[in-house]
Image (spheres, helix red, strand yellow):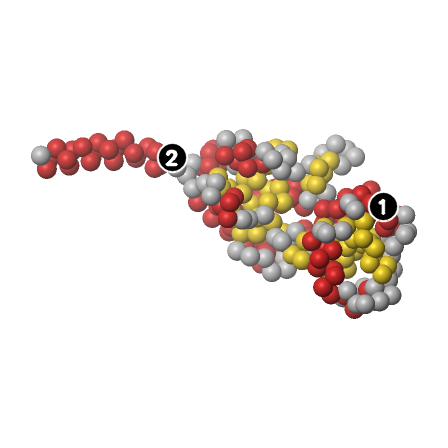
């Protein structure tokens, strides 16, 4: 009886061996085909959008190309939406998701995450000629913000009493007030500000200071630890060399700074 149990166990382990060996195949597959499929946004400037030459560009696109180059493979960019980016990873249509992905407990049940690669934030923006370095500098200035948004709540906590905060019902109205010159300053999210800057370069809008930071992470299929650790190694090197800061400055107007692992 004991011998039969041993034999049964041996057969079971043999049957499971291929599954175990194939459990972490993503990095090997990428290396073999010399291509990595990376899900990216194309409707979320400055992280990802389509330029006038109809090619994707933005911080997430730069990060995708950077990782592919460090792996020595071609980057195949796969446009996704917020709704389908995780399913694309789960169904192996993408090896990585680099698409302004925040990390939370619900998502961690279905996918894994690398270290953070970029900030995502709500901040204060104004023209280059407007001197603002902190909340105190908003004294006497008019500021547009979307009513009830995170940036509204954060701004309300720190704005001086003399700041003229004008609240609008949606982001479009908030942006319109700033673009038309009704206000000097806008408090909004990085993506809204990025779109504003792309569409209105004549305004010379720039980042002034952060209201709230929420970093972005790269999504990896559950259990693909070899790929996740390799990407973490690339990110650590990019942080040490200053490349993460350069990307953030190019697209967000500020360094990446300290990001969570």
The structure residue drawn at horizontal position 79% and vertical position 35%, both measured from the top left corner, is 52
**Which of the marked residues, 1 or 2, is nearer the chain's N terminus?**
2
Q: Is residue 244 left or right of residue 254?
A: left
Q: Nearer the viewer, residue 235 or 261?
A: 261
The residue labelled by disc 1 is 176
Location of residue 50 in the rendering, given as x and y in whole percent from the top left corner: 73, 35
Residue 244 in view (yes/no) = no
Circle 2 is placed at which residue position?
22
Q: Nearer the viewer, mark 1 or mark 2?
A: 1
Please name the residue shown 62% across and 42% down the image.
99
Contact between marks 1 and 2 (CB within 8 A): the answer is no
- Measuring from the top left, give residue 44's x and y in whole percent: 70, 41
Residue 163 lies left or right of residue 71; in this view the side is right
Q: Residue at x 85, y 45 (%)?
A: 176
In this image, 116 relative to 158: left or right? left
Nearer to the camera, 219 or 162: 162
Q: Measured from the top left, where is residue 210 in percent x and y? A: 71, 59
Residue 239 point in image, percent of width and height = 59, 56
User: Could you tell me which secondary element the residue under label 2 belongs to?
Assistant: helix
């Amino acid at each position: 009886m004991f011998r039969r149990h041993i034999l049964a166990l041996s057969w079971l382990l043999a049957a499971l061996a291929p599954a175990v060996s194939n459990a972490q195949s993503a990095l090997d597959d990428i290396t073999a085909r010399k291509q990595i499929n990376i899900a990216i946004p194309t409707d979320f400037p400055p992280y990802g959008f389509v330029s006038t030459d109809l090619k994707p560009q933005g911080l997430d696109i730069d990060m995708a190309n950077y990782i592919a180059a460090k792996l020595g493979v071609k980057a195949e960019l796969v446009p996704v939406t917020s709704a389908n980016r995780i399913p694309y990873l789960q169904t192996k249509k993408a090896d990585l998701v680099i698409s302004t992905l925040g990390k939370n407990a619900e998502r961690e049940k279905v996918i894994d995450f690398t270290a953070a690669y970029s900030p995502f934030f709500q901040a204060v923006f104004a023209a280059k000629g407007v001197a603002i370095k902190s909340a105190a500098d908003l004294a006497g200035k008019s500021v547009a913000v979307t009513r009830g948004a995170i940036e509204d709540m954060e701004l309300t906590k720190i704005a001086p009493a003399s700041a003229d905060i004008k609240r609008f019902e949606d982001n479009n109205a908030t942006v319109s007030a700033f673009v038309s010159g009704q206000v000097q300053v806008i408090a909004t999210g990085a993506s809204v500000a990025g779109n504003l800057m792309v569409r209105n370069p004549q305004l010379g809008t720039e980042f002034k200071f952060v209201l709230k930071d929420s970093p972005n992470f790269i999504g990896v299929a559950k259990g693909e630890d070899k790929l996740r650790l390799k990407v973490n190694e690339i990110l650590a090197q990019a942080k040490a060399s200053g490349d993460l800061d350069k990307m953030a400055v190019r697209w967000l107007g500020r360094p990446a700074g300290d990001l969570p692992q």
